[in-house]
Image (cartoon, coloured by chain):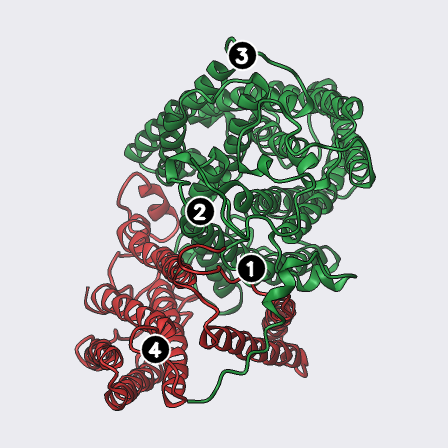
Chain colours: A red, B green
Amino acid sequence: MATEEGTYYVPAQSKWPIIASIGLFLTLAGAGMMMNDMSAGVKDSSAHYVFYAGGLLMAWMLFGWFSNVISESRAGLYSAQMDRTFRWGMFWFIFSEVMFFAALFGTLFYVRTFAVPWLAGEGDGAMTHQFLWPDFVADWPLMVNPDNDLFVGAANVVDPFHLPLINTLLLVASSITLTFSHHALRANDRYKTKLWLIITLVLGAAFLFFQVEEYIEAYNQLGLTLSAGIYGSTFFLLTGFHGAHVTLGAIMLAVMLYRVYQGHFEAENHFAFEASSWYWHFVDVVWVGLFIFVYIF
Amino acid sequence: MTSATDTHGGHDDHAHGPAKGLMRWVLTTNHKDIGSMYLWFSFIMFLTGGAMAMIIRAELFQPGLHIVEPAFFNQMTTMHGLIMVFGAVMPAFVGLANWMIPMQIGAPDMAMPRMNNWSFWILPFAAVMLISTLFMEGGGPNFGWTFYAPLSTDYSPPSTTFFIFAIHMLGISSIMGAINIIATILNLRAPGMTMMKMPLFVWTWLITAYLLIAVMPVLAGAVTMMLLDIHFGTSFFNAGGGGDPVLFQHIFWFFGHPEVYIMILPSFGIVSAIIPAFARKGLFGYTSMVYATASIAFLSFIVWAHHMFTVGIPLIGELFFMYATMLIAVPTGVKVFNWVTTMFRGSMTFETPMLFSIAFVVLFTIGGFSGLMLSIAPADFQYHDTYFVVAHFHYVLVPGAIFAIFAACYYWLPKWTGHMYDETLAKTHFWLSFIGMNLTFFPMHFVGLAGMPRRIPDYALQFANFNEISSVGGFLFGTTQFLFLFIIIKCIRGGEKAPAKPWEGAEGLEWSVPSPAPYHTFTTPPDVK
């Protein structure tokens, strides 16, 4: 589109979408087969080959597709209008992620406000309590489940002011250091850009390390597992998906670091960097929500 | 600084037409190609889901078990719903959006053309994964398209895992499609095309896209929790571990209610384009249409529990969701009023798109009224899970979504193909569809009110006559769609040459380009006054 801002870039044919579709299909079909084989107790399952094949295709696709976009951008094919498209796209993608976490938080709130108290006889459903599990007492974190033979409750809760507090400090600090890096990029100070970005990545990696540590502790010392009832279920659901998003955000930032080393980005033109930092701030905000509602209260 | 090694295939190719051969469709970044693929995919799914409906109607032709096993019947009702919702209706609307939105706002293409292609190509793979479940050990999903836990968790067949991943793929496709549409509309409008000058199809799609990115992730959350319950020992939907099967229903319907509006809002936009064109009068109350659409979208987020009146929610919940649901009648009423008022004292002609649109207004209103009946919580206690509900949602989805898609196809076919379709055949298609559809679904109101439960392959003798009528109507509606296929193919292959603007009263930028629309339109943005 030839406007005062120049032409809107409409790319030519691309092989990446179809590779992406095949890759996604194989990854998910492989994951599905692995899970079914696992639950059915199949010993020598070969499902993981399908999964890995899909994963490799996806990795190749991401690498190739982003390479195309980066070289187009660096060849100056993108106008200011294109830049706005990327901004809208990233913004609403993060919004969709917000809604995903909203569903997970909604689950936690529903369980704590309604499901567990109702099971213990509150509300109009008192008979359920009487007939099914008359001894059940509502409590949060729920340590003794209604059917505590089927779902063995956890022995202990995670202490919020130990590892989770450290992790909160790490992640909040990483958001700040990332902002320093961004300011340095805008001021064209490449050395500081790299320095603060590396510090951000180290903080992120430390967060992930402690998160793994916490999981190991939960499984080995607290008896807090996926099958420990709704407390364990919501705990691992929320922290697990958050951890996966931190991992993704860290990969994005690592790519940005690589690109800074490659001499990419200008003081005025570095949306990939901005998009990654938006994403990082988003996972940071989610963590604060987690710290408050999963760990403290 | 390394120099950029630019491997892009050549921006200059765009002056030319499409590439040759099959790979044109696989690799394309052109919104018209992608729109066509979406529409064809949707039609194939429409026939697939329709075939399943035929099996259901054949089984219900007479009381007793005659043709299929109950277990297979359950798979048919489930897959019919899933395929029609995710395979037929939603992709058809995205296909129309792809074709029309760039042309209606004067954009050169969609904002992210490569991602657009990916959004489409995920769909056939997702459909393969979904349909393949029918051939797996233990059969396909058999818990209804709403897949309530624990039917879909503790008591589900192993193929449910693949059903879950198919839903994930469909969700990824929808979210990317919606983001693309939002970016296109917000960023690629021609200079002078202000928001309040946009055609209503663009407006309704913008709002639909917001609904999509707001609720598809919630559905992803729901199926993810199902997956964890099935394979990883969690207890989200198991009361024994402190969870709640009702929680599943809340999450599902928080997605599900906006979802049904995702399937109707673009229809509103289509009808709002067609009725003024054939009444030769501007649309009455454009601004109120925009606000009514936005209100409906907002209300769709706060009414979900009206699907769950009988599940045992607190009285205050019943009241809130009942009144909130009734509120939807207000903006919907504004819309119906505006369509009728647009036709009032217009110079009307009744070409096929107009016939489908008028049928839309009348029959969708019937579906709306039965919805109003269902919104009354104490009455819903009687209607719940009966054929009355089936009649209701088929009245809003068949003459609502499907008729609007037919109308849109006939309305824009001359622009797509450069030929006029065969008007006589098209009118035949309309009347047979209209009669078939009403014959199928109107008697369901009666058997439903008399107490016939849905999703059951057998029924009491007294329902036999009405079910026979329904089945005959269903077969009529089903076979009629082959006529539609024939009309489309005939129109693509030839026919009377269509002028740039084949409809006298039509308005919009799409009619300013020749028919068929060139492969690339508006590489220079048009001047919008």
- Disc 2, SS: loop
Amino acid type, mark 3: Gly
Instruction: Compute the Cα span from label 4 to label 1.
Output: 50 Å
Indicate which disc residue B189 carries: 2
Left or right: A206 as drawn, with respect to B101: left
**A90 relative to B341, above or below:** below
Of the numbered discs 2 and 1, the one sitting upstream in the chain is 1
Of the numbered discs 1 and 3, the one sitting upstream in the chain is 1
Between residue B464 and residue A249, name the one nearer to us: A249
Instruction: Compute the Cα span from label 1 to label 3.
Output: 40 Å
The reply to whether discs 3 and 4 touch (Cβ–Cβ < 8 Å) is no
Q: Position of residue B486 (x, y in %)?
A: 82, 36
User: Which tag is nearer the camera, tag 2 or tag 4?
Assistant: 2
Indicate which disc residue B346 carries: 3
Q: Which residue is mark 1?
A: B113
Instruction: Compute the Cα span from label 2 to label 1.
Output: 16 Å
**B236 relative to A245, above or below:** above
Q: What crowding class fits label 1: few (fewer than 14 Cα within 10 Å), some (14-19), or many (20 or more)?
A: many
Q: Position of residue A59 (x, y in %)?
A: 55, 79
Q: Position of residue A203 (x, y in %)?
A: 27, 85
Quarter where residue B470 is shown: top right
Indicate which disc residue A223 carries: 4
Between residue B333 and residue A84, name the one nearer to us: A84
Q: In the image, are marks 1 and 3 on the same chain?
A: yes
Instruction: Compute the Cα span from label 3 to label 2.
Output: 31 Å
Amino acid type, mark 2: Arg
The residue shown at (44%, 47%) is: B189
The residue shown at (65%, 67%) is: A18
Amino acid type, mark 4: Gly
**Location of the C terminus of chain A (image quadrant):** bottom left
The reply to whether discs 2 and 4 touch (Cβ–Cβ < 8 Å) is no
Marker count (numbered): 4
